[in-house]
Amino acid sequence: MTPSRRRFLMLAALFSLGVSTLCYGRVFSRWRSSRHAAEALDAQGGKSVYETGFTHQGHRGMLGTFMFDGAVSDALRQIAKAFPGAKTVFRNEQLGQMSWTDNEVTLSWLAIGTESSGKTVVFQTERASAEQESAVPEMPAGIPAYPNGRNLFTARMDADGTALATASTIDAPAAVDRFYESHLSGHGWMRAFPPSTGESRMGVYLHRNNMCIVLAGRDFGDNETRIAVLHKPQGLK
């Protein structure tokens, strides 16, 4: 089994365990109903998976996922078609983030590519536009924020405590990978697969019934490293 296939299967397992969530909770101005927002991405090839609520800096919102065929760049193009005016926050071959906002709501999408599997998973979050991002990420217990990183987004699912965090740093992806491997292995986590040797890095870690996935890759725009951390408590029961 190729490393890319292993990565895809681990992500798929994470979705089946309830991490993947699809949301459209607020009725925002451009769409008559939350269903219309879902249909906009469905019309561009996105396949909805699941939905749940999440907490962002003490505020309630909705978070979810779509599965797209193709690479990260393909998924971002489809999102831009569904939501004209959506802005690309960052993009590389493995990760991408976009956002769209009006006076009432802000939508954000985090795209995670699975290389040769030919699939991209897109997390969609919705929150009130008046809410501001915190400089201090709300990381799950035992999973640190990268020390030389700048917080981009954090959220925690209401249903089971699953956490998603993204950050940016000037450090290389390999440095991010080494930091998390050193910290997590020192606290009882086991790395499921050997580290990759390419520019982008991915680590899958297991500890008792918990799972943590760390992704790091260079942004094509500003050459900073983008970090995504997914933590699933009690994920392997």
Image (tube, rainbow, N blue to C red):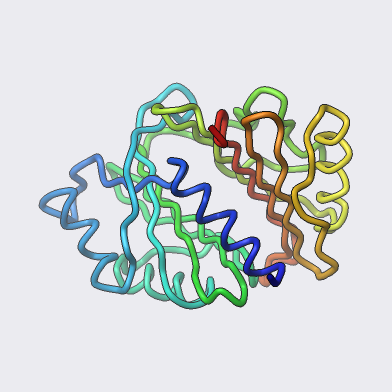
Residue 128 appears in view: no
Q: Which residue is drawn at 64% across and 72% down?
A: 93
| Image quadrant assignment for residue 174 | bottom right
List x then y, in percent, for residue 153.
55, 41
Q: Is residue 228 left or right of residue 40?
A: right
Count of number-bearing discs:
0
Position of residue 85 relative to residue 130, above or below, is: below
List x then y, in percent, for residue 13.
52, 50
List x then y, in percent, for residue 180.
81, 41
| Image quadrant assignment for residue 114 | bottom right
Q: In this view, does 65 lie to the left or right of 4?
A: left
List x then y, in percent, for residue 43.
24, 72
Q: Which of 72 and 186 is in front in this view?
A: 186
Q: Which residue lies furthest to the left in this view?
A: 32
Position of residue 157 relative to residue 191, above or below, is: above
- Quadrant where the N terminus is found in the figure: bottom right
Q: Which of 166 and 224 is in front in this view?
A: 166
Q: Which residue is drawn at 60% across and 44% down?
A: 152
Position of residue 230 relative to residue 101, above or below, is: above
Q: Is residue 2 left or right of residue 91?
A: right
Q: Which residue is drawn at 52% across and 76% down?
A: 118
| Image quadrant assignment for residue 4 | bottom right
Residue 123 appears in view: yes
Q: Which of 202 and 211 is in front in this view?
A: 211
